[in-house]
């Protein structure tokens, strides 16, 4: 018989998790007060603790630290609506064995709990040393939370990491996150764009050269592998390097030593390699364009970054971060974005991913005439959207009595998202970036109700306010 203790200041969440997890072999207890949960842990045997992070009485990470003094080996799953790499690393570093984001998928919750109880029975725990924050990577979608988990677990090791993803998804940020959360964080992080350099220049950059090795080599250079000794070398777009360079890189991975161009002496190096590519390396191997042995050496741990179009619920978070940064860097007093403009950004396909979004936000901030970005601050997106939908371009003059109000635009967008998800309130709330109760209040105000389909997404408790879409 298993006993699970759920700690969340929202009693709805406690009840929902009890409904999902309780069965003939499992008893689920709920506590809305973390201090009461600690007292219960002292008096009752518990097999698994599930705790929220953001609680007013005592935050989840502080609770986790106190739990370690009461039941040192108790497996803990941390849940939060504010996903980040730093939260994941801190949680796992403090002894949590897993990390999930709200709203939670029913199947994911059950799978996490099953794994946790299996680990409990096997007396296994995962521990990652706590380290500094890394706030460049933004997102709390399930795909990004999975990325955070992988980084939190692989960073303290010496394993080679292969980051896969389309151009603009932030592969270098992930590489830096691995470095920043590793024991090598005090060493150098060196990034090399393999696709931008020819073979001769790339070889010299990475391995160094002796004086006179080639025309123009008036002095010796140690090379980036030697300079990064004790740190991390990030090989971006490694799928574009030639077969000859692949062979040399394989030697570094196997032998951990390098020889400069024109030199005869091998120099040992202690570097961690993080590689990245937008190519399908397995297909490149099958086509004979990439060495199979190097591929296997690189993919010890693989991190797959989703394109922005597959994580649209992260766009409001990214917009807030990018807008704040752009305003700070340019000195423009831009402090927010309108619902209409955000809806425009959410509807765009983003073929250039986060890089394209960053450029669009920076341009809008630089040219903004007001302190809140509006749809007219994104003329290219408005034009594309107008071509696709056949609606008038937003920059054209529309009579005032024909202009929809912001409330009407908000109503249309909310109902469109709800219809796209078959009336499932929880899924629609996730895309909109609000909690389910807020969405219910909005629908009531709009004069429309919707019934959530059974199963699927678990809506969790949150702020009682009617949250804005931005």
Image (tube, grey):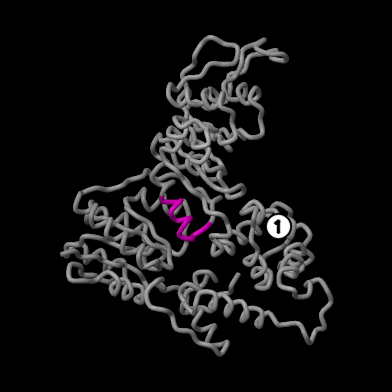
Tell me: 243 left or right of 335: left
Give above or below for 158 relative to 397.
Answer: above
Of the 4 image quadrants, the one containing the C terminus is bottom right
Give above or below for 233 relative to 37.
Answer: above
| Residue range highlighted in magenta | 139-149
**For the residue labelled by badge 1, is the local secondary structure a helix, a strand or a loop?**
helix
Looking at the image, how many numbered discs can be counted on the residues?
Answer: 1
* Residue at the (63%, 14%) spot, across then down: 220
Residue of label 1: 360
* Residue at the (54%, 47%) spot, across then down: 165
- Residue farthest front in this picture: 287
- Residue farthest right in this picture: 397
Decide: few, some or many residues near mark 1? Use Cα within 10 Å; few <14, some 14-19, many ≥20. Answer: some
Of the 4 image quadrants, the one containing the N terminus is bottom left
Q: Quadrant of residue 102?
A: bottom left
Give above or below for 462 relative to 323.
Answer: below
Q: Which of the pair 204/406 is nearer the observer?
A: 204
Give above or below for 33 relative to 292.
Answer: below
Q: Position of residue 221 (x, y in %)?
A: 62, 18
Q: Position of residue 216 (x, y in %)?
A: 72, 15
Q: Position of residue 222 (x, y in %)?
A: 58, 19
Tell me: 298 left or right of 215: left
Q: Which secondary structure class fits the magenta region best?
A: helix
* Residue at the (51%, 39%) spot, across then down: 281
Inspect the magenta stretch and tell me whether residue 282 lies in it.
no
């Amino acid at each position: 018989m298993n006993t699970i203790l759920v700690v969340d200041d929202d009693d709805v969440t406690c009840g929902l998790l009890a409904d999902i997890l309780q069965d003939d072999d499992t008893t689920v207890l709920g506590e809305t007060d973390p201090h009461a949960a600690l007292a219960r842990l002292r008096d009752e045997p518990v097999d698994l603790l599930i705790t929220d992070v953001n609680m007013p009485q005592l935050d989840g990470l502080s609770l986790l630290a106190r739990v370690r003094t009461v039941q040192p080996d108790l497996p803990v799953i941390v849940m939060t609506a504010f996903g980040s790499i730093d939260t994941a690393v801190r949680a796992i570093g403090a002894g949590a064995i897993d990390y999930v984001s709200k709203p939670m998928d029913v199947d994911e919750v059950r799978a996490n709990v099953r794994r946790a109880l299996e680990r409990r029975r096997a007396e296994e725990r995962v521990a990652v040393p706590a380290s500094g924050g890394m706030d460049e990577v933004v997102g709390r979608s399930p795909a990004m939370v999975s990325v955070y988990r992988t980084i939190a677990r692989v960073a303290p090791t010496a394993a080679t990491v292969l980051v896969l993803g389309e151009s603009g998804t932030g592969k270098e940020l992930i590489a830096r996150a691995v470095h920043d959360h590793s024991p090598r964080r005090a060493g150098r992080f060196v990034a090399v764009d393999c696709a931008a350099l020819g073979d001769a220049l790339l070889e010299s950059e990475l391995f160094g050269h002796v004086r006179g090795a080639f025309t123009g080599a008036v002095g010796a250079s140690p090379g980036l592998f030697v300079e990064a000794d004790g740190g991390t070398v990030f090989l971006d777009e490694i799928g574009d390097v030639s077969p000859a360079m692949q062979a040399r890189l394989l030697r570094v991975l196997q032998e951990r030593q390098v020889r400069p161009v024109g030199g005869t002496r091998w120099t040992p190096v202690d570097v961690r390699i993080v590689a990245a590519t937008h190519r399908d390396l397995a297909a490149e191997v099958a086509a004979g364009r990439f060495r199979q042995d190097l591929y296997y050496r690189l993919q010890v741990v693989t991190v797959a970054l989703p394109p922005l179009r597959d994580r649209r619920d992260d766009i409001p978070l990214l917009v807030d971060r990018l807008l704040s940064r752009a305003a700070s860097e340019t000195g423009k007093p831009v402090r927010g974005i309108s619902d209409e403009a955000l809806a425009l950004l959410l509807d765009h396909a983003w073929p250039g991913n986060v890089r394209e979004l960053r450029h669009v936000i920076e341009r809008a901030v630089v040219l903004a005439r007001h302190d809140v970005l509006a749809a007219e601050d994104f003329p290219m997106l408005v034009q594309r959207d107008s071509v696709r939908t056949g609606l008038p371009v937003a920059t054209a003059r529309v009579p005032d009595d024909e202009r929809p109000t912001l409330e009407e635009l908000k109503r249309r967008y909310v109902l469109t998202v709800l219809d796209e998800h078959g009336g499932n309130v929880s899924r629609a709330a996730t895309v909109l970036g609000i909690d389910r109760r807020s969405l219910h209040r909005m629908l009531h105000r709009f004069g429309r109700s919707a019934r959530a389909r059974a199963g699927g997404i678990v809506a969790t408790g949150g702020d009682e306010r009617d949250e804005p879409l931005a």
